[in-house]
Amino acid sequence: MQIIHQAQRIALYIYFFSINFEMFVPLNAVGLSLSRFTGILYLLTIIPELESFVRTDRIGTTLLPVWVYFGFLTIMSISNINEISKDYFNMVVFQNILFFWFLINHERKDYMIIERGMFCFALGSILLLLLFFAGIGVDYEKGNRLSMFGDNQNSLGIKMTVSSIILFVTVAQNRLNFGSVRYLLLLIIPFMLIFIRETGSRLSIIAFVLAFIAGAILYKAKNYLVKIGILFGSVISLIFIGILLFQSETMINRLENTSKSGDLGERDLIWKTIYPIIQENPITGIGSTGYEFQTNLIWGRYVSPHNVVLEILCLTGLIGLTLYLAFMLQVFEQGYQSYKRNGWLLPVLLIIPIMGMLLSSHMLESKIAWCIFAYIVSSSAIAIKSLKNPQNKYS
């Protein structure tokens, strides 16, 4: 059994690491990206103990709305099958929810396994950063914005933002017991900011700055002098961040367009166009098949709403939105409780990029978003009990 447990640990670490290369398909393998391959490996390691990975005690109320949502989405997609789209079962969303469930239960068996996994995700971002500076897999498109290994600019930017938050909190709270060597991780964050700047992702920059400010304010220092020092250092750091940002003409132009003219990168045009779809089916939506059919009629191709709320309204109407928001509210509450009870920063700070993704991204199929959900929920619903017996069961 010890071998199986170690295999589960390693597979989880590799999976988190590989999410940075979510769209990369090694050796041109058909339909099998690197992260999907590592996800399969993780699944294979937990099959021998699958029963312990599907427990629902203490997390049933969180799981219920999201599984009901997926079931309703599937029903609506089946009922709207058409000649353009017959793909009624969204395997990516199903896999993400399933892994969300597995990861929470893995935390029961191995205390802080997800937090270590999150650090492995940050290590994957560091590798991506090194490849960027080495010019490997780099491509500039859409207004001189960085993309890598087939991943789009906003996805790359938000992943690097999440990793910068992980490194910042790893240094500040040292829950992984890295000792004084952890301070070297701070040297990496400015380079991550340069990477984010090159993607031109406004969402990522805003999330980075807000998380940085929130972290400085929420950090529970030992005394007032330390707190004052942290706040003063944060102000100096924000000035440095501003200097880095204003070295990018692309980022400056995108931020200016947003502030002066409300430019949302054509998202507002997409939102106006899909609004009639929501009006026609406000209660139940038209499923993924119906939505793909409608966007093909309008644009000749599938077009993402770039807004999770509007996407859910299109797919499953007010019924689906109610279920999904019930799930999200529970996740946010768990993050707040982790901070309130223990002062843990990472669960609450990661809510900031999640909120950004909720409003302007494609989050349902984002692997890192569901890993963050699992981390936040486990940090409160599962990890609190584990504090009474923090010794790993696998050790």
Image (cartoon, helix red, strand yellow):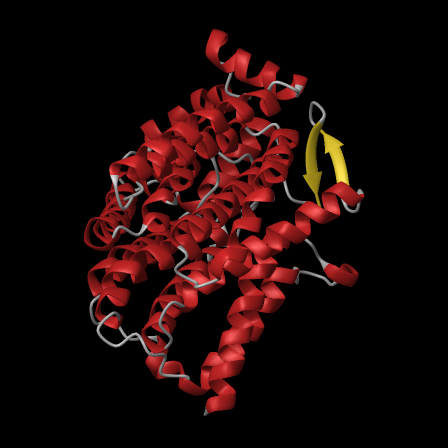
The front one of 112 and 231 is 231
Residue 45 seen in the current view: yes
Can you name the residue that lies furthest to the top here? Answer: 260
Residue 153 x/y as whole percent: 62, 35
Can you name the residue that lies furthest to the front here? Answer: 225
Residue 204 x/y as whole percent: 51, 33
Residue 309 seen in the current view: no
Residue 272 x/y as whole percent: 43, 20
Toward which corner of the image does residue 29 lie, by quadrant? bottom right
Residue at 71% from the left image edge and 57% from the top image edge: 25
Toward which corner of the image does residue 290 lie, by quadrant? top left
Residue at 61% from the left image edge and 27% from the top image edge: 200
* Labels in figure, total: 0
Residue 20 x/y as whole percent: 60, 52
Q: Which quarter of the image is occupied by the C terminus?
A: bottom left
- Relative horizontal placement of residue 215, taking residue 257 as reference (left or right): left
Q: Is residue 226 above or below residue 238?
A: below
Q: Is residue 81 above or below residue 383?
A: above
Residue at 30% from the left image edge and 58% from the top image edge: 377
Q: Which quarter of the image is occupied by the N terminus?
A: bottom left
